[in-house]
Structures are given as structure tokens and as C-alpha cells.
Amino acid sequence: MFRNQYDTDVTVWSPEGRLLQVEYAMESVKQGSACIGLRSSTHAVLGALKRSVSELSSHQKKLLEIDTHIGVGIAGLTADARTLAKWMRNECLNHRYVYGTPMPVGRMMTDLADKHQRTTQTYVRRPYGVGLLVAAYDKSGPHLYQTCPSGNMYEYHASAIGARSQSGRTYLEKIFDNDQLKDASKDDLIMHALRAIAGCVGGDGELTKENGSVGIVGKDEAFYLIEGDELQPYLDRLELEGGTGGGDDDDDDDDDEEEGEGGEAVEESKEEGGDAMET
Amino acid sequence: MFRNQYDTDVTVWSPEGRLLQVEYAMESVKQGSACIGLRSSTHAVLGALKRSVSELSSHQKKLLEIDTHIGVGIAGLTADARTLAKWMRNECLNHRYVYGTPMPVGRMMTDLADKHQRTTQTYVRRPYGVGLLVAAYDKSGPHLYQTCPSGNMYEYHASAIGARSQSGRTYLEKIFDNDQLKDASKDDLIMHALRAIAGCVGGDGELTKENGSVGIVGKDEAFYLIEGDELQPYLDRLELEGGTGGGDDDDDDDDDEEEGEGGEAVEESKEEGGDAMET
Amino acid sequence: MFRNQYDTDVTVWSPEGRLLQVEYAMESVKQGSACIGLRSSTHAVLGALKRSVSELSSHQKKLLEIDTHIGVGIAGLTADARTLAKWMRNECLNHRYVYGTPMPVGRMMTDLADKHQRTTQTYVRRPYGVGLLVAAYDKSGPHLYQTCPSGNMYEYHASAIGARSQSGRTYLEKIFDNDQLKDASKDDLIMHALRAIAGCVGGDGELTKENGSVGIVGKDEAFYLIEGDELQPYLDRLELEGGTGGGDDDDDDDDDEEEGEGGEAVEESKEEGGDAMET
Amino acid sequence: MFRNQYDTDVTVWSPEGRLLQVEYAMESVKQGSACIGLRSSTHAVLGALKRSVSELSSHQKKLLEIDTHIGVGIAGLTADARTLAKWMRNECLNHRYVYGTPMPVGRMMTDLADKHQRTTQTYVRRPYGVGLLVAAYDKSGPHLYQTCPSGNMYEYHASAIGARSQSGRTYLEKIFDNDQLKDASKDDLIMHALRAIAGCVGGDGELTKENGSVGIVGKDEAFYLIEGDELQPYLDRLELEGGTGGGDDDDDDDDDEEEGEGGEAVEESKEEGGDAMET
Amino acid sequence: MFRNQYDTDVTVWSPEGRLLQVEYAMESVKQGSACIGLRSSTHAVLGALKRSVSELSSHQKKLLEIDTHIGVGIAGLTADARTLAKWMRNECLNHRYVYGTPMPVGRMMTDLADKHQRTTQTYVRRPYGVGLLVAAYDKSGPHLYQTCPSGNMYEYHASAIGARSQSGRTYLEKIFDNDQLKDASKDDLIMHALRAIAGCVGGDGELTKENGSVGIVGKDEAFYLIEGDELQPYLDRLELEGGTGGGDDDDDDDDDEEEGEGGEAVEESKEEGGDAMET
Amino acid sequence: MFRNQYDTDVTVWSPEGRLLQVEYAMESVKQGSACIGLRSSTHAVLGALKRSVSELSSHQKKLLEIDTHIGVGIAGLTADARTLAKWMRNECLNHRYVYGTPMPVGRMMTDLADKHQRTTQTYVRRPYGVGLLVAAYDKSGPHLYQTCPSGNMYEYHASAIGARSQSGRTYLEKIFDNDQLKDASKDDLIMHALRAIAGCVGGDGELTKENGSVGIVGKDEAFYLIEGDELQPYLDRLELEGGTGGGDDDDDDDDDEEEGEGGEAVEESKEEGGDAMET
Amino acid sequence: MFRNQYDTDVTVWSPEGRLLQVEYAMESVKQGSACIGLRSSTHAVLGALKRSVSELSSHQKKLLEIDTHIGVGIAGLTADARTLAKWMRNECLNHRYVYGTPMPVGRMMTDLADKHQRTTQTYVRRPYGVGLLVAAYDKSGPHLYQTCPSGNMYEYHASAIGARSQSGRTYLEKIFDNDQLKDASKDDLIMHALRAIAGCVGGDGELTKENGSVGIVGKDEAFYLIEGDELQPYLDRLELEGGTGGGDDDDDDDDDEEEGEGGEAVEESKEEGGDAMET
């Protein structure tokens, strides 16, 4: 009720020193379907739950190749993500053309974050409504970055964004705490990714070869998508464990409710993780 | 009631992370007359119900040729559609001039969707108020794409947009589930299209050679419009089946009411299909 | 009452997916005096009722020559119409200069409609407040087009716009249904035009050689205005039939009331004819 | 009361299809002092009532020479009129420089009206707050034009604008109906002008050689101002007739009241004459 | 109360056809200290009451030399006046440079008034908040002009602007009526100016050599300021007459009250003199 | 309460002919710490009370050298002052570069005031929130100028700006009235400055070598800052007189309260001194 | 409640002469985690508390190297800080390229502060939401600067910004008062920094080698970060003193509450330190 004065223009500060329009844009990330990422000391892996707008349509692409050494997972406005991916592809092409080498991921990420930041400082454009998980491998090894509409950028060992991503994040924290991440083999990583993403499936849904998607990049291995029939063997292993369904229903429901409350969720997001604007 | 603060500017996020002006623009697609599309492994077919503003006027064109290998069906603001079609024709001409080959449809669609996305990020222009179904045939076979005012773009096996399109979509889902689509002959596809479009005719209306329109494109077959007398034989076959009238009146009425409720319909559209902005 | 939020900016969508400012601009067309058009297979004819702001002034021109093969009739803001006519004349001159041939009417109309559409998509300019009836003859025979402030454009067999145009439209529909239009002689067309326009005269007014105006274009006949004394013989024939007065008073009154109700009329206009924005 | 939403921006249409800001600008013309014009078949004459802001100041110029063959009378914002007159003088100079001939009046008037129209279509400038009566003589004989803030332009036999101009208009209509205008001599025209302008003088005022002004242009006669002592003989003749005073007091009062009611006057102005925006 | 809708933007017309922001700007002229001007057939004289913001500061300059043949007196915003004076000096310098002669005053005044007018037609700048009295001598003799924020410009025999200027204006009208102005000697003019300005001094104030200022220009006499000790002899003569004090206290008080009422004063100003925008 | 309509845009006039945003900006000058200036016939001296944001920080610079012959004292927004000082330094450098001589102070001040004025006439920038006291010595002797956010500029014998400056001003007026200023020696001026500034110290504060600052410029003496240990001897002399404390507490408190009342203070400021916008 | 009119646009002054949007932006600095700085006569040291958005992410960088002789600590919006740091790096590179020497810190700081100030004077951009502590060593010895969103810049002996920085500031004031700062050794400075930063840790948190960070620059010592294992020995020493925990809990809680109250905090901030806009 008391916010309405400061939350319709991206260049207006609230009396508490917050940019509410940027926080609202971050809400749109939570409405995309889940996307998770994790990395060992040799590989970076992305996993995503593809949505299908209709039985008749193909599933939406959630994991996109940017260059042979970079792939992104998206959650939020599809059209914004496509625009950003196009820009990233061009940056990589230009770098290869000028320097003859793949673009260093750190530099790419800084430029990308600055591209986000600019939309938060002038009134001409709205902030982007999409969060990206970027998996990459360059001279300094595998990387996993996450970007926010606010222009923030973090490097992660593992992360999860999008709707019902809390379950996935909880699983990832568990394996990280058990130190299972650092030395995981390529196959282990894929299975971890599938287990995390399976936790993000809604109530009566199930992780299938149609809606699941995994991308992997590593030393001397170009970014490669595992989907459809190629994904089935992994799903079979997962099924044996008993885990393709929407396991954490209770958590999910809570999460849904919170999202429904809007304003509250904004508050909460500042505690939870991934999108605090200040450092 | 509680939305009024965030829904008059296309660059303003609502607290829930939505762009309401873009959602409102998507409503205008629902007010155009119905347009459907479907494809087999060899052909892509469009069907449309032409509106006539008056007994004295010619019927409005609903299916437009863009290039010999691309045709579009439109639902929404006619003037916006004409502007977009003109732009697409220019793109195809330029591509042929520069590369000497027809423009790949995927590239055309990405550019078109980006053209939509740009109108949703700056305050200078409003989002386009039109949805397009694009049928095309290129090196990778037949394609059916759908665009939204939000800048989203989907590839479909079959789809239906515009007023009362739910009936048509239901029919298309049925034949898709029965696997009748993939190997359908050219004539089968045309008959499917007519049956789908006949379901979208309003209460006491009827599908006639005046208001019906079918477009087809396939391997070595340029986009070709079947209208008027040429359409009559197919309509005769349809009549024998007993199906040119407005068969699914009950559905239609429901659909109409929902549209009348406005705000509600917006909510619902997020469930239904075709225009969820997030992925 | 409930519209006030979405109807003051041309680039703002209402929750129902409508552009209310464009619809309001279309109301101004209804306030201009009547203008009608019709075509046979050989000629296109325009008729108009000229208004005089005062006894002392000349009557306002309603029919304007654009080029030898194109004439327009206008209803709505005079100043906007004059600006558009000037632009059309320039286009025709440029075409003749560059190609050495008269401008094809279809191309002219598309360009004109796009000029309208642009004013509906950016906030810099307001939509034009004028509707045009364009009578033309080119290689593909006689044409009659109508444009709207929305950027829509239709081809008609016969049409009527402006205040009390319903009576004229009714007459035109009758002769079209009786198939009297297609093979009508030049003189028949002029008489039809006069009868239609006579029906649009207000309560106690009368169609005279001062306020009536007819324009005709056909094969090898440049656009030619019949006014004043030259019009008298036709009016004499009309008088013999008993038809220069405001015949359809009842209709007119109804029509007036509806216009007075404003908002209602907008709704209704979507049913009636000539200016539905969607197709 | 119910208009406030649509009347503060010149590019916003009211639901009735009107541009209220343009109509408001037309009110400012009614607040200028009266200006009248009339023409015979050989001469065009302007008459005006000059206001003096103070006993100590010179009277404001109401009739301005544009070129030897064109003169204008103004009613409304003086500063706007001066700006327009300066522009007209430049146009005439340029035409003489480029073509070596006086500028045709019709062309000048179209350009002038378009200059007005442009201010009504974009939000950058306000509409001009002045009406002009233009008396001119060119190859096609004498002309009398009137312009409006709306960008409309009319050719008149005789006209009157400004405060209390109704009386003058009534007189002019009377002599026009009696066919006294067409063949009037130069002196007759001047006397008609003075009689018309005398009718526009307020309550206890009087037409004197100080506040009266007459301008005349004709074949081989450059635009010439008759003021001061040169005007006295005509005023003497007028006095003999008994007509320099404010004769139509009752009308004037009515007129004043109507102007005081503002909104009402706007309505009424659409009936009365001279400034209906639609044709 | 009922004006608030139309009075915050300079490009918005009120329903009565007035530009309220321009009228408000004219109020600022009334808040400057008084400035008067008068001319005989040989000289033009300005007089002003200098304000001192503090005992410690020098008095503000009220009379400024523009060129040897032009001087201005100001009332209103000092900073605006200084900007305008700078512009006028540049114009004069440029004219001398290009043509080798002093700038004709009429031309200077037209350009100055147009500079004012432009600020009233676009929304980019506010109207200037200053009125100028311009005394000049050129080939056509002595001149006295007055400008308004509205872009109006008048030639005067004598005038007074600023706070409590009514008393001065009354005195000037009296001597004008007695025909004492035209043939007054240079010294007479100076005494008239001092008497007029003495009438504008507030309640217990007095006209002294510190706050008084007189400027004079005439044939072969460059604009020359009489201030301080040089002014004392004239003040002594004035004292002998008994007239350096604030003689017209009652008038002043009335005037002050009226200004305090704001809105009312605006109305009134239209009656009084000097700043009616229409002619 | 009744001002809210006209006080949020710098280009909007209030009905009383005032620019409220400019007046509000002038309030910010009153919130800076005190700054005083005075001049004899040979020297110009500035004095200031430096604020320290914290025990740990250096004191803020209040007196800045612009060129060897010009120094400024500031009160108001520090960042605005720094920007203006930078601009002034550039102007001086440019003048020396082009003409080889120090910039005349009068010319510098006019340009500076115009720079202020421009921010008050367009909506693009806000008015500067700082007042400057400029002490300078050029060919015409020592000068003391004061600028306002309004674009006004005054020459003073002595002046004081900033919080609690009334006490300092009172002291300066006293010595001016006693004619102690004109022929004061350099040391006298410094002592006068310290006494004046000591009067501006808040309740329990004291003038010390840390927070006090004096700048002096004179014939053949470049602008020179006396601070810290160099200031101590003067402070010792002042202490002997018994005057480094906040002597005029009562006045100060009053002054504080007035500032707290805001709106009232604006009114009052028009009476008091230093910032009346009109002349 | 009563502020809402003046606090949504950065170029609007409140009636009290304040720029509320700038003050709101300064609130965002208080929401960043703590950052402290201090300097002896030989070294400048920064200390910071790194936040981690999640267990899985790396800690956010709080101390950034700009050039070998300059390092910055940040509190506030991370994305804004990154943009500013990038700009500073470019400035340093350019200076080295053009002059062949490291950029003088004073000049860098003035340019940086002006970059901030510009965002507070035009409506195009919002003020930056970040405060910087800049530690540097150049020819004039070690420096510690602090910048504010307002465009202010201060030189400090020691300072602390960000959440719960009051405890750190208190500690720094204590050692400054005890004169322990000036002659402290490099190791002393690091220990002081750690003690100050340890005081800023929240309730049950602790200063660890993961979240602590120290940067140091001095004569012939390039800016160098001490983090992780390298930091552990110092933390061990600190632990022996008993000081890595959140020692000043009571203060912290108070501080938190104040921040929660928003508007109040703004008031208070003017008293406290570090961000008064006026001088």
C-alpha cells in the first residue's frame, strides 16, 4: 500500500534506498521454470525443466549454446533471454575474429552485467526480466555464473533459479556440504543435475525426456546438450532411485504461496539468496 | 482494481514481475477472427476465417504471401499486421539479393520476434497488437511458427489463434493425438484445416467459399492460396461430413464470456496456451 | 467511467486489448458530412454533401483530385485531410517523375494506410481524424478504397462515411443486392450516387447544386468533378423521382442520438461496418 | 466538469472525436477585437477596430501588409499574429526572388493552413491562438480567406471575426443577400466595411479615426491602409447615416455572456459559423 | 480553484482561450520595482527606482545601456533581464558590424518580441519573467517601447511598469492630456520622470540620489545615465515642489492588496492596461 | 498547503508570478555553514566556518582559489560548488591563454550568473543549490560579489550567507555604518572577518584554528588562505576581546526556528536581504 | 507523509532546500555490508566484510584494485560500484598512457565526484547507489577518500561505511584520539582494520578468513589484497584478543531499527557523519 509512490519508475529511489522496479523485475525470474547449474573441478553442467505452451508445440528451449565453450540456462521472459543470447553470441564472434581466441568468460560476464546495469540507471529502457545461469570452460577452468536483472553477477559452485527452485537449491547445498561436488565425474554431475531439477517439478508433474534438458561443458569438450532419447538412460537410473516426480511438494506449495503474495516475496527474496542488490 | 498503477506503461514492471501492457496487447490477438495452421512432414497449411466489414466490401485478407516459401496468417490489428508483412517481404527480398537464396525461416522468425521484443522494452512504441502464424518450407522441411506481441515465438505442429480458436485447437489436438498429422497427404491437411476453421465459426455463421481461406506450402510448391471457387470442392466434401456450421457453440459462448470479463481472461490465458511470456 | 485510465495515450492498450484513442479518432469521421462512393466494372464515382460554414463562405471542398486517375472524398477534420491530400499528390508526382507512369492505386493505398498506422504506434503524433474514400482507375480497372484513422484500408464495391451515412449505405446495399452496380452505365452511377447522398441530408435540408458534388473516373476518363450548374440536370431527374430531401429522417435521428451517447457509439461501431480494427 | 481528462493535451482525442485544446485555442480568436473583410468583383477590403492598451500608447496594429498584393487582419494573440505575418512576408519575398512573380494567394493560404495544422498534431507546440482574414488580389481576381487555429481555411465573400463580430456578420449577410456586394464600387466597399465594423463597437464606444482602420487591395492597386485623417471623410459620411456607435448592444451583451460561459460557447461555436473543424 | 487544470503548462489553452502560465509570468513584472518612460519629440527618458537588497550592497541596476542609441529599464526577474540585455547588445554589435549603422529600433523590438513569443509556444522553456521599457533614438526620432512576457510589444508616449506603477501612470496621463509632453525640453522630461517615479515610492520611502536613476537619449545624444550626485540638483528642485515622498499611499496600499489576491489581480490586469494579450 | 501545484517544476510560474523551485533552491544556501566577505578600498577578505563531517575527516574546504586574483567562499551543496569552481577555473585559464591577462571579475560574474539563470529557464536541469561570495582584485580595485541560485548577482561592501549568517551581517552593517570598512588595514579586515564569523558559530561551538578560515586578496597580493597555525595569532587577539564563542545565541535560535518552518522562511527571505529575485 | 510531492524526481527541490532523491540514494549505502579504511603516515588500509548470497556462491568482492597505487572498498549497489570501478580503471590507464605517470589521486577523486554530481542535476539518470572508500598512495603520501551518492567527497584519517558501521567508526575514533594512527606500523594498521571490521559483524556472525578482506597500499608497495589463508594469522592474533565476534550487538540492534524506520534515518544521517550534502 505504502509503496506506490516509488515503484513505477526505474530511476526513482524509495526512501529506504531501494529500487523497487528492479526488485519487481527480479520477480519475473521466479516465474520462469526452474534452471539449475553446478560444477566440479573439471566440468560445468546446466539442467532445466522445459515448458511446453501446448501439447502441439515443441518445448521451449531453456539451454542455449553461446559459443563452443559457453552455454546459458534461462529463467524469466523468453524474449528478453533470446535478445541477450544473441548479443552474447555476437560478442564471442567478435572476440574470436579480433583476437583469434575464445572470449574469456569473466570478461563476457562483466560486460553482460554492465548491459543489465545500464537498464537500471536511465528511464529509457526497463530492466531485463530474465536471470541467466552461465556454464563455461576457459583457461582458468570450469565456471558457473549467475546474472540478475539488477546487474549483479555471482560466481557459484552450484545454483538454482526459477519457479520452485528452492528444492533444487536445497539438494545442491546438501551435496556441496558433503563435498560431493568438487571431484564428481561427468556422469555424477549429470545425475546430480537431474536429481536437483526433478525436485523442482510441480505437484503431479514428472521429469521426462521431453521436458528435461541437460547441458555440459568441460576441458576439451564443447558445450553439448543432452536431450530426448539421449537423456533417457540417465532418467532410467534416476527412476531406479525413485526420484523423477515432484518430490518436495510441501516445499513447493509454500513457495507458490509466497510468490502469490507478491510484496512479501520481495522482502523475503532479500534474505533467501541470489538476488540481494547490495554488497 | 488493484492493477491500475502498473498497467499503463510498457516499461513498468508490476510487483508480481509482469508486464501488464504486453498482456493487454495479447488480448487484441483474441479479438481477431480465427486463424489456424498445421503441418505434416511434407506440407504446412494455414486456414483462416475472413471477416467482411460490410456486405459491400471485399473480405479482409487473412493469409498473406511473404515469399514463395513463406506465408502468414494474422489475427489482431490489421494495420499492424500489414506493416509487419511489408517488413518481412523486404527482409526476404534483401536476403535473396545478397545471398541468392531464399531466407531460412528460422532466421526470419528470430529477427521478427526481436522486432516484437524491442517494442516491449522502450517507452517509445507500443507492443504490436497482432499474432502471426507462419507456414514455411525450407531446406529443413515444413515449419509452422507462431509469434506473440510479447516477442515470444514458438514452433508448432498445429496451432489456432484468434476469436473462438479453442474449438479449432481442440480438433487439432485430437488429430495430433491420433497421429493423423505427420503423414497426412496434402488434401488431408486441407480438409483438417477446414474442419478446424469451421469449428471457429460463430453461432449462426457458416464456412463459405467467401469467408474461408486456405494457404499451402510444401516441397517444390510455392505458397499458394485456395479461395473462392477453388475452395468450393473442399467445402462440398466438408458439407457431406456435416461440418461447415458453428459446431461448438457451447465452447464458443464460454469463450466469449471470458473475453468479456477482460482481467480474468488475462489470468486464464496464462494457463491455456500460446502466450505465456516466461519460459 | 471505467475507461479513463487507458484512453488518453495512443500507445496504451486497454485491458481488453483495444486502443481507445484510435477509436476516439474514428468518431471524428462520423462528424464530417456524408461522403459516398461506388463503382461499376468501368467507372468509380464519388458523391459528397458539401458543408458551408456560413452563407457568406464558399462551400467546403469535399472531393479532391489527386492525380488524373485518382480522386478522394473526405469526412472528418478538414485540415488533416488537406495535409494527406497534399502528400498523396506528391507521391503521384514522384512516381510519374521516376517511372513515367501513373502510380498504381494499390501501392498508393498501402503507403497511405501505413502513414496512418505509424501515428497509432508512437506517442509523438496523434492519429489522423479523417476517413478517405478513394476512387481510382488503373490498369486493373476501377477501384474504390476506404481508409480509417486506425490505419485500416478496405476495398469496397460501394461505401458511405460521415454523418447520417447509414441511409446512404442502406441504399447502396440495396442496389448492390439487386446487382444493379456492376453493369451500371456512367449516368446510372451518377444517379445512384445522388440518390445515396440525398438520403444523408439532414432533417429539413435538401440536396442542391450548391451543396452536392459528384466526381467520376473511368477508363480513359480523367477524374472529373460535376458541380453547380453541371449537376443541375441530374438533380432535376432526381427531383422527378421525388428524392432530393432528407428521406430517412427516422434513421438519421437515431443515428444522431447514438453519436451523442459517445461511448456507446464506439461499441456499436464495431458491429456496424467500416471501422473494426481487428481482422 | 466531465471533460477534464481529454482537454489538456493537443494530441489527445476526446471520446466524441474532438480535439478540445484546438477548440479552446479557437476561443482566443473571439477575445480579439473585431476584424471584418468583404470583396466585390474588383476589390477586397478589410476593416478593423484597433484596441489601445492605454491612453498613452499608440493603437495596436490590426491590419498588416504582407506584400503589395496581400494584406491581413488579425484577431487573437497579437504575438502569434506577428510571428505568422513575419513568416508570410518571408514566403512572399522568397517567391518573388525565385519566380520573379507575386506569390499566388491560394498557394500561400494552403501553406499557412498547413503550418497551423502541424501545431495540432504533435505535442511539441501549442496551436496558434489567432485567426486571420486575408485580403488579396492576384491573377484570379480579389480573394478573401479566413484561417482558424485548427488549420482550417475558408474562402469568403465577406466575413467577420473577433469580439462582438456577430453584428458585423449580420450586416454583411444582409448586403450579400441584397446582392450589393458583387458590383460594389471601391468607395461602397469601404463604407460597407465601416458600417460592419461600427456594429462591432462595444456598448458606449464609438468608431473614430483613431480606432478604425480600413485596408484595400484591387487590380493594379497595392494594398493600402486608410487610417487617421484619411479615414475621417468616410466616418463623416457614416455619421450622417447615424451609425458610428455601438448599435447592436443587445446582441453584444448576449455574445459577451456566452463567451463568459466558456464551455457552452464552444458547443455553440460549432453551430454558428466560421470554425467547425470537420467538413 | 477551478483553474488548476490548465495553468501549469505554457502550451495548454484554458477553455476560455487563455494561456494562464503566460499571465502568471506577467505577474512577476508587477513585483519588480517601478520603472517609467516618456518621450518628447526630441528625447526619450527612462526613470527607475533602484532596489537595494541590503544596506551593504550596491543598488541594483535598473537602467541599462544597450547601444549608444538604446537604453532599457527593467521590472521583474533581474536574471532574465540581464540575459535579454546581453542578447540585445549582441544584436546591436552584429548589426553595426554587418551594416556599419546603428540597429533600427523597430527591427530590434520585433526580434525581441519574437524571442519572447517563442517561449510561450513550446514546452521547453518558461516565458521570461520581465517587462522592458526601451528608450531609443534613431532616424525616425525618439521611441519608447514596452515588452511583455507574452511577446506583445507596444509603442508608448509614456508608460510605467512594476510595483505601484499606477501612481506614475496617472501622473504621466495627466501631463499627456495637458499636452505637456510633446514639446517638453530635456530638463522638463527629466523632472516629469522624477515626479512620476517619486509617486511610485512605497509608504515611508523617499526618492533619493541613491535609489533614483534617470536615463536619457536624444538626437546626437548618446544614452546617458543620471545617477548619484548628478541627480541631486533635480531632486532638490523636486523637493522644493514637495514631491520626493511616497505621495499616493492610498493607491499603493490598494495596489498591494490586489497583488496579494493573485487570481483576482490577473483578471484585473486585463482591464487596466499594458498587458492584454489579444488585440 | 496551497502551493503544491506550482512548486515541482522549475519552469512553472505560480499565479503570483513566482518561481517556487528557485526559491526552494535558495533555501539550501541557508543550510550551508556561514561564509562572510568584506572589502576595504585596497583588499577583499572572505571568512568561513568549516564544517567537519566527522572527527576523523579533514574539514571541508569553504574558501577556494579560482585564480591568483579571485577566491570564492561557498554555502550550500558542496558538490554543486565544486562543479562551479571547476568551471570558473577553466574560464580564467582560457582568458589568460587567449588574452594574456587575468580575467576581469565583472565579466566572470556576468557569465557565472547567466550559467545560473539558464538552469532556471529550462526543465532539463535543476537550479544550483549553492551561493557564492567572490572576492577579487582587478584593475578596478577590490570587489565582493554574491551569487544566488536564481541567477541574481550583487556587488557588496560586505555580506554574509549560510546558516546563522544574520549575526555576522549585523556586525558587518555596524562597522559599515561606522565607516570602519573603507579605510581598514589588511589586518583590521581580517579581524573584522573573524569577529563576523565568530558570531555565526552555533550554540556551544567555538571558532578555532581548525574550523576557521580566512582568505585575502589585494593589490599585488595573490589570493591567500590563512588557516591553521597561521590563523592562531588572530584568534588569540579575538579571544582577548572575548569573542570566539557563539555570541548571538538568541538570534541564532530564532533563525533556526525560522528555517525549520520552511514555507515561512521563504516569505521572510524576501524581506530580509540577499535573495529577492525581482529588481 | 508530507514529503511525497518532492521526493520522486532528482531535479526537484523540497521547500526546505533539500534533494530528497539524493538522500534516499544515500540510504542504499547503509544497506551494503561494512567497509572501513584508515591511514598512517606511510600506508592506507581498507577492510571489508564480504557478503555471500548463498552457501554455494563465492563471496562478493568488496575491495577492488583500480591501479597499482589505488584500491577501493564499496558499500551499496554492487552493479553501480562495478560500473564506477571500470570507469576509474580506464581513467588510470588513460593517464598512464598520456602522461606516463600514475594518475594523481586528488584529480581522480574530483573527476569521480563530478561524475556523481552530474547524476544529481539532470533528470536523465538516477544518482548512483554506492559509497566508495578509496585508499591510495601517490607523491603526496597515503590518502583515504570517501565518496557519496550526492557527489560529495571527503578526505579522512579513518572512516567506516555500510551496515552497522557505527561500531567500526567508534573504534577508529578511539585510536585516532589516542594518536595511535599516525605512526602505526603496517601490521598495526591491519590489526586496527580487523578490529574495526569485527565490530561491524552482525549478531551471531563472526569474522573469518572467508568473509574478511583487507587491502593495503603504501610507499613502493602496490595495492595488495590479504584474504583467505593469508588473513588467518591476523585473525588468530585477533582471536587471542577475543574480538572476531559481533562485539557491539546492542549498538547494532539500535542501528538496525533506525534503518527500518527509513524517514527517521534520513534525518538522523544528517547529524551523524559522512553524508551531509551542504558545507
Image (tube, coloured by chain):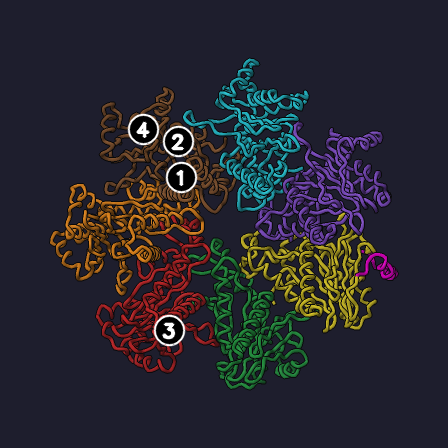
Chain colours: A brown, B orange, C red, D green, E yellow, F purple, G cyan
Q: Is residue B149 magenta?
A: no
Residue segment shown in magenta:
E225-246
Q: State the CA–CA distance, disc 1 to disc 4.
A: 30 Å
- Tag 1, which chain? A
Q: State the CA–CA distance, disc 2 to disc 4.
A: 15 Å
Residue B77 higher or lower than A258, as above or below: below
Using the rendered image of the protein, determine whether residue A34 is visible from the camera's viewpoint. yes
Circle on res. C67: 3
* Residue designated by label 4: A193
Q: Is residue D61 left or right of residue C176?
A: right
Q: Circle 3 sits in a helix, a strand or a loop, which is it? A: strand
Residue C14 higher or lower than F235, as above or below: below
Q: Earlier in the sequence, mark 1 or mark 2?
A: 1
The three-letter amino acid code for the residue at tag 1 is Thr
Q: Is residue E226 magenta?
A: yes
Of tags 2 and 3, which is closer to the observer?
Answer: 2
